[in-house]
Image (cartoon, helix red, strand yellow):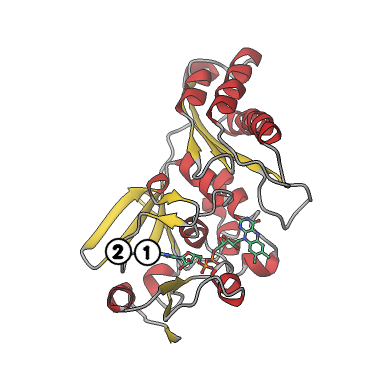
Amino acid sequence: MRYEAPTTTKDAVTLLAKAKGPAFVLAGGSDLLVRMKGGFVEPELVVDIKRIPAMQAIKKTATGFRIGAAVPCAAMGEDAALRKTWPGVVEAANLIGSDQIQSRCTVAGNLCNASPAADSVPALVAAGAKAAIVGPKGRRTIPVEKVVSGPGKTTLGKGEVVEAITLPVPKAKTGDAYLRFIPRTEMDIAVCSAGVCMTLGKGGVIESARVVLGAVAPTVLLVAAAAQAIVGTKLDDAALAALAKACEAACAPIDDKRGTVEFRTEVAGVLAKRAAKIAYQRAGG
Ligand SMILES: Cc1cc2nc3c(=O)[nH]c(=O)nc-3n(C[C@H](O)[C@H](O)[C@H](O)COP(=O)(O)OP(=O)(O)OC[C@H]3O[C@@H](n4cnc5c(N)ncnc54)[C@H](O)[C@@H]3O)c2cc1C
Protein backbone atom coordinates (compact mmCIF):
# COMPACT_ATOMS: atom_id res chain seq x y z
CA MET A 1 0.00 0.00 0.00
CA ARG A 2 1.23 3.48 -0.90
CA TYR A 3 0.62 6.38 1.52
CA GLU A 4 0.74 9.92 0.18
CA ALA A 5 0.21 13.22 2.01
CA PRO A 6 -0.02 15.97 -0.62
CA THR A 7 -0.23 19.65 0.29
CA THR A 8 -2.65 20.78 -2.43
CA THR A 9 -6.08 19.59 -3.46
CA LYS A 10 -4.87 19.42 -7.07
CA ASP A 11 -2.11 16.97 -6.14
CA ALA A 12 -4.58 14.86 -4.13
CA VAL A 13 -6.91 14.70 -7.13
CA THR A 14 -4.08 13.79 -9.52
CA LEU A 15 -2.89 10.98 -7.25
CA LEU A 16 -6.41 9.56 -6.87
CA ALA A 17 -7.22 9.92 -10.57
CA LYS A 18 -4.06 8.06 -11.63
CA ALA A 19 -4.41 5.21 -9.13
CA LYS A 20 -4.75 1.80 -10.78
CA GLY A 21 -6.10 -0.12 -7.78
CA PRO A 22 -8.46 0.80 -4.94
CA ALA A 23 -7.64 4.34 -3.76
CA PHE A 24 -9.04 6.08 -0.69
CA VAL A 25 -8.99 9.55 0.80
CA LEU A 26 -7.87 9.52 4.43
CA ALA A 27 -9.38 12.30 6.56
CA GLY A 28 -9.68 11.37 10.27
CA GLY A 29 -9.43 7.68 9.44
CA SER A 30 -12.03 6.74 12.06
CA ASP A 31 -14.02 4.78 9.47
CA LEU A 32 -11.32 3.96 6.93
CA LEU A 33 -8.78 2.52 9.37
CA VAL A 34 -11.44 0.36 11.01
CA ARG A 35 -12.38 -1.03 7.60
CA MET A 36 -8.73 -1.60 6.67
CA LYS A 37 -7.94 -3.34 9.97
CA GLY A 38 -11.02 -5.51 9.54
CA GLY A 39 -9.87 -6.52 6.06
CA PHE A 40 -12.97 -5.07 4.41
CA VAL A 41 -10.89 -2.86 2.10
CA GLU A 42 -7.34 -3.24 0.83
CA PRO A 43 -6.23 0.08 -0.60
CA GLU A 44 -3.45 0.28 -3.15
CA LEU A 45 -3.26 4.01 -2.38
CA VAL A 46 -4.24 6.11 0.64
CA VAL A 47 -4.22 9.89 0.17
CA ASP A 48 -4.05 11.75 3.48
CA ILE A 49 -5.73 15.16 3.09
CA LYS A 50 -4.83 16.58 6.50
CA ARG A 51 -1.78 18.49 5.20
CA ILE A 52 -3.77 20.46 2.63
CA PRO A 53 -4.19 24.06 3.89
CA ALA A 54 -7.40 24.59 1.86
CA MET A 55 -8.99 21.79 3.88
CA GLN A 56 -7.71 22.67 7.35
CA ALA A 57 -9.82 25.62 8.48
CA ILE A 58 -13.34 26.79 9.26
CA LYS A 59 -13.88 30.12 7.52
CA LYS A 60 -16.72 32.58 7.94
CA THR A 61 -17.41 34.06 4.52
CA ALA A 62 -19.95 36.46 3.02
CA THR A 63 -22.01 33.46 1.95
CA GLY A 64 -21.82 31.53 5.22
CA PHE A 65 -19.31 29.03 6.62
CA ARG A 66 -16.74 26.92 4.79
CA ILE A 67 -15.67 23.89 6.80
CA GLY A 68 -12.51 22.35 5.32
CA ALA A 69 -12.76 18.61 4.74
CA ALA A 70 -9.89 17.88 7.15
CA VAL A 71 -11.32 19.92 10.05
CA PRO A 72 -11.98 17.62 13.02
CA CYS A 73 -15.46 17.72 14.52
CA ALA A 74 -13.99 18.88 17.86
CA ALA A 75 -12.86 22.10 16.14
CA MET A 76 -16.43 22.72 15.00
CA GLY A 77 -17.57 22.64 18.63
CA GLU A 78 -14.86 25.14 19.54
CA ASP A 79 -15.91 27.65 16.87
CA ALA A 80 -18.21 30.08 18.72
CA ALA A 81 -19.63 31.71 15.58
CA LEU A 82 -20.45 28.36 13.95
CA ARG A 83 -22.01 27.09 17.18
CA LYS A 84 -24.17 30.19 17.47
CA THR A 85 -25.31 30.18 13.84
CA TRP A 86 -25.80 26.44 13.26
CA PRO A 87 -26.21 24.82 16.71
CA GLY A 88 -27.98 21.76 15.27
CA VAL A 89 -25.15 21.01 12.85
CA VAL A 90 -22.55 21.40 15.60
CA GLU A 91 -24.46 19.23 18.09
CA ALA A 92 -24.76 16.50 15.45
CA ALA A 93 -21.04 16.65 14.61
CA ASN A 94 -20.16 16.61 18.30
CA LEU A 95 -22.25 13.47 18.92
CA ILE A 96 -19.87 11.40 16.79
CA GLY A 97 -17.84 8.94 18.89
CA SER A 98 -15.73 9.94 21.88
CA ASP A 99 -13.23 12.74 22.61
CA GLN A 100 -10.56 10.69 20.86
CA ILE A 101 -12.73 10.17 17.75
CA GLN A 102 -13.83 13.84 17.84
CA SER A 103 -10.25 15.00 17.59
CA ARG A 104 -9.83 13.11 14.31
CA CYS A 105 -13.18 12.62 12.59
CA THR A 106 -14.61 15.04 10.03
CA VAL A 107 -18.10 15.80 8.74
CA ALA A 108 -16.85 15.30 5.16
CA GLY A 109 -15.65 11.81 6.16
CA ASN A 110 -18.96 11.14 7.91
CA LEU A 111 -20.72 12.08 4.66
CA CYS A 112 -18.40 10.21 2.25
CA ASN A 113 -18.46 7.05 4.36
CA ALA A 114 -22.10 6.95 3.26
CA SER A 115 -23.61 5.24 6.28
CA PRO A 116 -27.40 5.74 6.48
CA ALA A 117 -26.88 6.30 10.22
CA ALA A 118 -24.20 9.00 9.92
CA ASP A 119 -24.95 11.59 12.58
CA SER A 120 -23.89 14.83 10.92
CA VAL A 121 -25.64 14.22 7.61
CA PRO A 122 -29.32 14.82 8.55
CA ALA A 123 -28.34 18.06 10.30
CA LEU A 124 -26.25 19.20 7.32
CA VAL A 125 -29.07 18.44 4.88
CA ALA A 126 -31.60 20.23 7.09
CA ALA A 127 -29.33 23.29 7.15
CA GLY A 128 -29.01 23.29 3.34
CA ALA A 129 -25.29 22.45 3.37
CA LYS A 130 -23.37 21.88 0.15
CA ALA A 131 -20.31 19.82 -0.74
CA ALA A 132 -17.53 21.60 -2.64
CA ILE A 133 -16.00 18.88 -4.79
CA VAL A 134 -12.75 18.98 -6.77
CA GLY A 135 -11.96 16.38 -9.41
CA PRO A 136 -9.97 15.79 -12.60
CA LYS A 137 -12.59 17.72 -14.58
CA GLY A 138 -12.64 20.73 -12.25
CA ARG A 139 -14.84 21.94 -9.42
CA ARG A 140 -18.51 21.41 -8.71
CA THR A 141 -20.75 22.17 -5.76
CA ILE A 142 -23.75 20.00 -4.96
CA PRO A 143 -26.25 19.76 -2.10
CA VAL A 144 -25.06 17.34 0.57
CA GLU A 145 -28.10 15.09 -0.04
CA LYS A 146 -26.82 14.43 -3.58
CA VAL A 147 -23.49 12.99 -2.38
CA VAL A 148 -24.71 9.67 -1.00
CA SER A 149 -26.46 7.25 -3.35
CA GLY A 150 -26.85 4.23 -1.04
CA PRO A 151 -25.23 2.46 1.92
CA GLY A 152 -21.45 2.80 1.39
CA LYS A 153 -21.96 4.40 -2.03
CA THR A 154 -21.43 7.98 -3.20
CA THR A 155 -21.89 9.86 -6.44
CA LEU A 156 -18.23 10.98 -6.38
CA GLY A 157 -16.36 10.06 -9.56
CA LYS A 158 -12.84 8.64 -9.79
CA GLY A 159 -10.37 11.18 -8.46
CA GLU A 160 -13.02 13.42 -6.90
CA VAL A 161 -12.47 14.79 -3.40
CA VAL A 162 -14.76 16.82 -1.15
CA GLU A 163 -12.67 19.89 -0.37
CA ALA A 164 -15.13 21.54 2.01
CA ILE A 165 -18.67 21.55 3.33
CA THR A 166 -20.39 24.91 3.09
CA LEU A 167 -23.27 26.23 5.17
CA PRO A 168 -25.35 29.23 4.05
CA VAL A 169 -26.01 32.43 6.00
CA PRO A 170 -29.35 31.62 7.62
CA LYS A 171 -32.27 34.03 7.26
CA ALA A 172 -33.24 35.95 10.40
CA LYS A 173 -35.30 33.86 12.84
CA THR A 174 -33.85 30.53 11.72
CA GLY A 175 -33.18 27.65 14.10
CA ASP A 176 -31.92 24.09 13.66
CA ALA A 177 -31.68 20.99 15.85
CA TYR A 178 -30.60 17.34 15.66
CA LEU A 179 -31.59 14.38 17.83
CA ARG A 180 -30.78 10.67 17.59
CA PHE A 181 -31.90 7.57 19.44
CA ILE A 182 -29.25 5.14 20.67
CA PRO A 183 -29.72 2.38 23.26
CA ARG A 184 -26.78 3.72 25.29
CA THR A 185 -25.96 7.25 26.40
CA GLU A 186 -23.03 7.65 23.96
CA MET A 187 -20.61 5.82 21.63
CA ASP A 188 -23.27 4.12 19.56
CA ILE A 189 -24.69 4.37 16.06
CA ALA A 190 -28.10 6.00 15.59
CA VAL A 191 -31.05 3.60 15.48
CA CYS A 192 -32.89 6.54 13.97
CA SER A 193 -32.38 10.28 13.94
CA ALA A 194 -33.95 13.59 12.92
CA GLY A 195 -32.60 16.97 11.85
CA VAL A 196 -34.89 19.97 11.52
CA CYS A 197 -34.25 23.53 10.36
CA MET A 198 -36.91 26.22 10.15
CA THR A 199 -37.37 29.94 9.58
CA LEU A 200 -40.13 31.92 11.26
CA GLY A 201 -42.12 34.77 9.78
CA LYS A 202 -44.44 37.28 11.47
CA GLY A 203 -45.99 36.27 14.78
CA GLY A 204 -43.92 33.11 15.11
CA VAL A 205 -45.54 31.41 12.11
CA ILE A 206 -43.21 28.95 10.37
CA GLU A 207 -42.31 30.33 6.96
CA SER A 208 -40.11 27.49 5.69
CA ALA A 209 -38.73 24.22 7.04
CA ARG A 210 -36.56 21.25 6.20
CA VAL A 211 -37.15 17.96 8.01
CA VAL A 212 -34.60 15.16 7.55
CA LEU A 213 -34.56 11.61 8.91
CA GLY A 214 -31.52 9.38 9.34
CA ALA A 215 -31.13 5.57 9.65
CA VAL A 216 -34.65 4.82 8.41
CA ALA A 217 -33.83 4.30 4.70
CA PRO A 218 -30.77 3.53 2.53
CA THR A 219 -29.93 7.26 2.50
CA VAL A 220 -31.07 10.16 4.67
CA LEU A 221 -34.60 11.30 3.83
CA LEU A 222 -35.53 14.92 3.20
CA VAL A 223 -39.24 14.69 3.98
CA ALA A 224 -41.03 17.46 2.09
CA ALA A 225 -44.45 16.37 3.41
CA ALA A 226 -43.22 16.76 6.98
CA ALA A 227 -42.05 20.30 6.27
CA GLN A 228 -45.38 21.10 4.60
CA ALA A 229 -47.18 19.84 7.71
CA ILE A 230 -45.64 22.58 9.87
CA VAL A 231 -45.22 25.50 7.45
CA GLY A 232 -47.89 28.15 8.11
CA THR A 233 -48.37 26.98 11.71
CA LYS A 234 -47.01 27.98 15.10
CA LEU A 235 -46.06 24.38 15.73
CA ASP A 236 -49.24 23.62 17.65
CA ASP A 237 -50.16 20.08 18.66
CA ALA A 238 -52.05 19.39 15.42
CA ALA A 239 -49.04 20.49 13.34
CA LEU A 240 -46.71 18.33 15.41
CA ALA A 241 -49.01 15.33 14.98
CA ALA A 242 -49.13 15.89 11.21
CA LEU A 243 -45.33 16.22 11.15
CA ALA A 244 -44.91 12.89 12.96
CA LYS A 245 -47.42 11.19 10.65
CA ALA A 246 -45.58 12.43 7.54
CA CYS A 247 -42.26 11.23 8.95
CA GLU A 248 -43.67 7.81 9.77
CA ALA A 249 -45.06 7.52 6.24
CA ALA A 250 -41.67 8.32 4.72
CA CYS A 251 -39.72 5.71 6.72
CA ALA A 252 -38.46 2.57 4.99
CA PRO A 253 -36.09 1.14 7.61
CA ILE A 254 -34.43 -2.22 7.97
CA ASP A 255 -35.39 -4.67 10.69
CA ASP A 256 -32.42 -5.69 12.83
CA LYS A 257 -31.40 -6.47 16.40
CA ARG A 258 -30.90 -2.76 17.09
CA GLY A 259 -34.43 -1.78 16.14
CA THR A 260 -37.49 -3.22 14.44
CA VAL A 261 -39.23 -1.52 11.52
CA GLU A 262 -42.12 -0.55 13.84
CA PHE A 263 -39.81 0.86 16.52
CA ARG A 264 -37.69 2.89 14.10
CA THR A 265 -40.80 4.24 12.36
CA GLU A 266 -42.47 5.37 15.58
CA VAL A 267 -39.31 6.85 17.09
CA ALA A 268 -38.53 8.77 13.88
CA GLY A 269 -41.81 10.65 14.32
CA VAL A 270 -41.13 11.28 18.01
CA LEU A 271 -37.60 12.58 17.35
CA ALA A 272 -38.79 14.81 14.50
CA LYS A 273 -41.39 16.37 16.82
CA ARG A 274 -38.82 16.96 19.57
CA ALA A 275 -36.20 18.34 17.16
CA ALA A 276 -38.85 20.62 15.62
CA LYS A 277 -39.71 22.01 19.06
CA ILE A 278 -36.03 22.78 19.77
CA ALA A 279 -35.52 24.35 16.33
CA TYR A 280 -38.67 26.46 16.81
CA GLN A 281 -37.41 27.75 20.16
CA ARG A 282 -33.95 28.48 18.71
CA ALA A 283 -35.59 30.40 15.85
CA GLY A 284 -37.17 32.64 18.47
CA GLY A 285 -40.64 31.10 18.55
C1 LIG B 1 -15.35 4.32 18.20
C2 LIG B 1 -16.11 4.94 17.05
C3 LIG B 1 -17.29 5.62 17.32
C4 LIG B 1 -18.02 6.21 16.28
N1 LIG B 1 -19.18 6.85 16.58
C5 LIG B 1 -19.90 7.42 15.58
C6 LIG B 1 -21.13 8.12 15.88
O1 LIG B 1 -21.54 8.25 17.03
N2 LIG B 1 -21.80 8.64 14.83
C7 LIG B 1 -21.37 8.54 13.54
O2 LIG B 1 -22.04 9.05 12.63
N3 LIG B 1 -20.22 7.89 13.24
C8 LIG B 1 -19.47 7.33 14.22
N4 LIG B 1 -18.30 6.68 13.93
C9 LIG B 1 -17.85 6.61 12.54
C10 LIG B 1 -16.84 7.71 12.14
O3 LIG B 1 -16.14 8.22 13.25
C11 LIG B 1 -17.53 8.89 11.42
O4 LIG B 1 -18.24 8.45 10.30
C12 LIG B 1 -16.53 10.00 11.04
O5 LIG B 1 -17.20 11.22 10.82
C13 LIG B 1 -15.70 9.67 9.79
O6 LIG B 1 -14.85 10.77 9.52
P1 LIG B 1 -13.30 10.55 9.21
O7 LIG B 1 -12.75 11.91 8.91
O8 LIG B 1 -12.64 9.81 10.30
O9 LIG B 1 -13.40 9.67 7.88
P2 LIG B 1 -12.36 8.66 7.24
O10 LIG B 1 -12.35 7.38 7.99
O11 LIG B 1 -11.06 9.33 7.00
O12 LIG B 1 -13.08 8.45 5.83
C14 LIG B 1 -14.34 7.80 5.74
C15 LIG B 1 -14.64 7.49 4.26
O13 LIG B 1 -14.87 8.70 3.54
C16 LIG B 1 -13.88 8.90 2.52
N5 LIG B 1 -13.50 10.31 2.62
C17 LIG B 1 -13.11 10.97 3.74
N6 LIG B 1 -12.94 12.26 3.48
C18 LIG B 1 -13.21 12.44 2.17
C19 LIG B 1 -13.19 13.57 1.31
N7 LIG B 1 -12.87 14.79 1.77
N8 LIG B 1 -13.51 13.41 0.01
C20 LIG B 1 -13.85 12.17 -0.47
N9 LIG B 1 -13.89 11.07 0.30
C21 LIG B 1 -13.57 11.20 1.61
C22 LIG B 1 -12.74 7.94 2.88
O14 LIG B 1 -12.01 7.53 1.74
C23 LIG B 1 -13.49 6.80 3.52
O15 LIG B 1 -14.03 5.95 2.56
C24 LIG B 1 -17.55 6.11 14.94
C25 LIG B 1 -16.33 5.42 14.68
C26 LIG B 1 -15.62 4.86 15.72
C27 LIG B 1 -14.33 4.15 15.41
Locate ligand 1 by image quadrant. Answer: bottom right
Residue 264 vs 190, above or below: the answer is above
Residue 112 vs 218, above or below: the answer is below
Q: Residue 110, position in %: x, y?
A: 52, 58
Instruction: Check contact, mark 2 vs mark 1: CB within 8 A.
Output: yes
**Which of the numbered marks, if any, corresponds to residue 163?**
1
Q: Residue 127, position in %: x, y?
A: 47, 41
Residue closest to the far right: 184
The answer to which of marks 2 and 1 sits earlier in the sequence is 2
Q: Quadrant of residue 30?
A: bottom right
Q: Which residue is mark 2?
A: 134
Residue closest to the far left: 137
Name the quadrant of the C terminus.
Answer: top right
Label 2 to label 1: alpha-carbon separation: 6 Å
Using the image as rendered, state which of residue 217 and residue 162 is in the foreground. 217
Mark 2: amino acid: Val
* Within-10-Å neighbours for mark 1: few <14, some 14–19, many 20+: many
